Image (cartoon, rainbow, N blue to C red):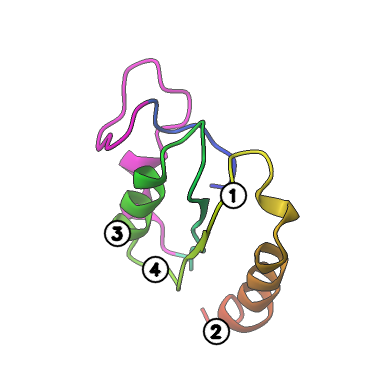
Amino acid sequence: MLGQTESLSPNTRKTYCFDAFPSIDKISKVTSPVLVIHGTEDEVIDFSHGLAMYERCPRAVEPLWVEGAGHNDIELYAQYLERLKQFISHELPNS
């Protein structure tokens, strides 16, 4: 789910016909653990979309909201890599 352009406007709760990544419509069917990571200052996909993905996902683990991160710089924040490591080593194996 990382880096996909699912939503074109803030507070979008549905997919437009021209949306190439309709993840918001499919997330409720995911059966594996999901880590939602989203920058609070994302200029491409509004932060509200990350919140909606988290709320709709039946197997979501504790999300990471990266304060100040945008769409293309989130990996530069230390908590990004730390949270990924935690998810891979502790939360994913328990599924």
Q: How many C-alpha atoms fall within 10 Å of the one at disc 2: few (<14), some, or many (≥20)?
A: few
Whole-number angstrom distance, CA of label 4 to CA of label 1: 24 Å
Quick one: label 4 or label 1, which is nearer the N terminus? 4
At numbered mark 1, what does the secondary structure look like: helix, strand or loop?
loop
Question: What is the spatial separation of the Cα atoms under label 2 and label 3, in whole angstroms?
Answer: 21 Å
Using residue 6 as the reference point, say whether residue 86 is left or right of it. right
Q: CA distance from mark 3 to mark 1?
A: 21 Å
Of badges 4 and 1, nearer the viewer stands 1
Q: Are marks 4 and 2 in contact (CB under 8 Å)?
A: no
Q: Residue 17 lies in magenta, yes or no?
A: yes
- Tell me: residue 42, above or below residue 76: above
Q: Magenta segment range? A: 9-31
Against 78, residue 24 (above or below) is above
Residue type at the position of mark 4: Arg
Which element carries disc 2, helix, strand or loop?
loop
Circle 2 is placed at which residue position? Answer: 94
Asked whether disc 4 touches disc 1, contact meaning CB atoms under 8 Å apart, the reply is: no
Tag shown at residue 69:
1
Q: Quadrant of residue 61?
A: bottom left
Mark 4: few/some/many CA within 10 Å (<14, 14-19, 20+): some
Contact between marks 1 and 2 (CB within 8 A): the answer is: no
CB-based contact (under 8 Å), mark 3 and mark 4 = no
Q: CA distance from mark 4 to mark 2?
A: 12 Å
Q: Which residue is mark 3?
A: 55
Q: Which residue is mark 4?
A: 59
